[in-house]
Image (cartoon, helix red, strand yellow):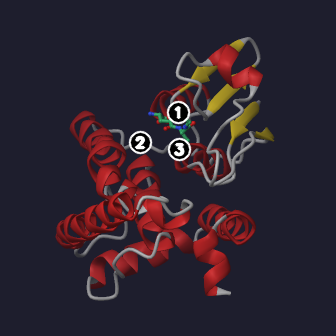
Amino acid sequence: MKLYSGPLSLFARKVEFALYEKSLPFERVMVPFTQEKGYAPKHEAVLAANPKGQVPVLEDGELTLFDSTLIFEYLEDAYPAPALYPRDAKDKARCRLVELTADEIFLPPIRSLMYRNAPADPDPARQDARVAEGRRGEAVILERYAKLDRQLENRDYFFGAFSVADIAMFMMVLWALRLRGPRIDAYPALAAWYARVGARPAGQKIASEIAAADRELSPLAREAQ
Ligand SMILES: N[C@@H](CCC(=O)N[C@@H](CS)C(=O)NCC(=O)O)C(=O)O
């Protein structure tokens, strides 16, 4: 298998997490990324495979797929063990809902913090507007933390065994923290779950590679050194 990934691509790292969990060997191609230019210039293979021009893109033999959620579903069908979805149909649907909630509902307030790693806007008014939006984003993130804390109370993982719901939500919390968003210490169930997912070999590998990429690419990480 070949995965087109990005050093600081939340969605591509999410797929790497699943590949490691399933112990599937893969060749990783890192597409160019800088905080200044984002994903420009786009990798030709990614443009050819994905009309959105986005990573992750997975090739498995003659199959080429994009979108982290579709890739998760394919990996589960093609390589079912270990399972990363619950077996029960309703829990499986709930698991997909947690993944969607992470990717589409939790991400927007986290995105509002990304300006912290981007070059400052030369227009002070526009920069102030970004800072204000980031503050509003932080308030929303705190509401999400409180909800996750209630959901995870007395649970090791969202659905008994580790699943894609844990991967998708872990990636969001990791992103909020790496962008110096609100801490999770005041949310004991969330903090314990986050540490549990992060202690898995795949979680450790993902988190340490992202931290290394940040040290190389991100002003926030350089400031913290
Ligand atoms: N829904 C897609 C989102 C993929 C995505 O947003 N990829 C980002 C990197 S994390 C990207 O390639 N951005 C470049 C662009 O949009 O031009 C998925 O789950 O894979």
Find out whether the residues at labels 2 and 3 contact each other: C-beta distance under 8 Å: no
Residue kind at label 2, given as amino acid type: Tyr
Find out whether the residues at labels 2 and 1 contact each other: C-beta distance under 8 Å: yes
Q: Which mark is residue 162?
A: none
Residue named by callout 3: 11
Residue kind at label 1, given as amino acid type: Glu
Earlier-in-chain disc, 1 versus 3: 3
Judge whether 13 appears above or below 87 on screen.
below
Earlier-in-chain disc, 2 versus 1: 1
Q: Position of residue 67 (x, y in %)?
A: 51, 29
Q: Position of residue 35 (x, y in %)?
A: 63, 55
Q: CA distance from mark 2 to mark 3?
A: 18 Å
Judge whether 5 appears above or below 152 on screen.
above
> Residue visible at 61% across and 45% down?
38
Q: Nearer the viewer, mark 2 or mark 3?
A: 3
Q: Quadrant of residue 88?
A: top left
Q: Nearer the viewer, residue 205 or 221?
A: 221
Tell me if 154 is positioned left or right of 73 in this view. Answer: left
> Residue visible at 47% across and 59% down?
121
- Considering the numbered disc 2 on the image, is that residue within a helix, a strand or a loop? loop
Judge whether 63 appears above or below 121 on screen.
above
- Considering the numbered disc 3 on the image, is that residue within a helix, a strand or a loop? helix
Residue named by callout 1: 76
- Considering the numbered disc 1 on the image, is that residue within a helix, a strand or a loop? helix
Residue named by callout 2: 85
Earlier-in-chain disc, 2 versus 3: 3
> Residue visible at 35% across and 39% down?
87
Q: Quadrant of the N terminus?
A: top right
Would you call the spot at circle 3 few (<14 residues within 10 Å), some (14-19), or many (20 or more)?
Answer: many
